[in-house]
Image (tube, rainbow, N blue to C red):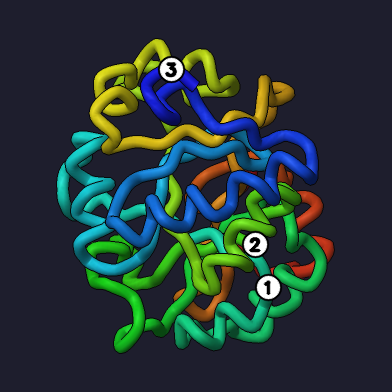
Amino acid sequence: MIGGDSLGIPFWSPDEVASAIRRAREHMESRGVLAYPTETVYGFGGAIDRDSVDALIGLKGRPKGKPFLLLIAGSDMLEKLDLHLPSFATNLAARFWPGPLTLVLPGGEKRVPEALRGPEGGIAVRWTSHPGLQRLIRAHGDAITSTSANRPGVPPATSAGEIRAQWSDALARGALRLLDGGRLLPSPPSTVVDCTLRAPRVIRPGAVLASRLREIAPGLIGDA
């Protein structure tokens, strides 16, 4: 591939995903940033240690204090992160995970860098339903960070081509590695629900509507 992996690593079929995992893990272990497909849009992310988070902040040009969410591939990863699920959060997760629902959870003080803690005091986490990404996270053995793969003021990327166009310099110098999962179907972002208080509260409307959430959590505050 011209320029090494600068044009992207195929990440579509099961065989391509299996072939891509080693290079993706090596890039994360060297504190690099990945661009990858999810069940909604393309995301940027990497390992959750402080240096990797700083690299993501630097690439995205995002002000400190505006956190990223974490993607997991199993409920056991919540225990590893030392995150806590109130009973209503457990019920929401059982119904809508894996899928486009992000829960802001308490805990993680000894495991998750404070840069990932949001203004609500919790850590935003989602069990992704993207099969290739699930395999990568499982192989990595831990959660990965996630933020939308786009420049400020530009809609989130839904194709690898948009990332190549917007981030060619970062790809060329190796700071960013692209997992090319093709063009994604148009989709709303994940719904974000704050679970740090006594009742769940919608803080970003998205793919899962409030009416569906209330079937599981009748005390839900806000609309989505």
Q: Which residue is mark 2?
A: 127
Q: Residues within 10 Å of mark 2 (few under 14, many from 20)?
A: many
Which element type, helix, strand or loop, lies under badge 1? loop
Q: Give the residue type that dot 1 points to.
A: Gly
Residue found at x 50% / y 22%: 1
CA gap between label 2 and label 3 equals 34 Å
**Left or right: residue 214 compared with residue 142:** right
Nearest to N terminus: mark 3 or mark 1: 3
Instruction: Say if mark 2 contacts mark 1, CB within 8 Å.
Output: yes
Between marks 2 and 3 in the image, the one whose residue lies nearer the viewer: 3
Q: Can residue 43 be seen at all in this image of the molecule?
A: yes
Give residue 202's quadrant in the image. Answer: bottom right
Query: Where does residue 188 sit, x and y in percent of width and height?
Result: 64, 32
Q: Which mark is residue 74?
A: 1
Nearest to N terminus: mark 2 or mark 1: 1
Q: Give the residue type that dot 2 points to.
A: Trp
Q: Give the residue type that dot 3 points to.
A: Ile
CA gap between label 3 and label 1 equals 36 Å
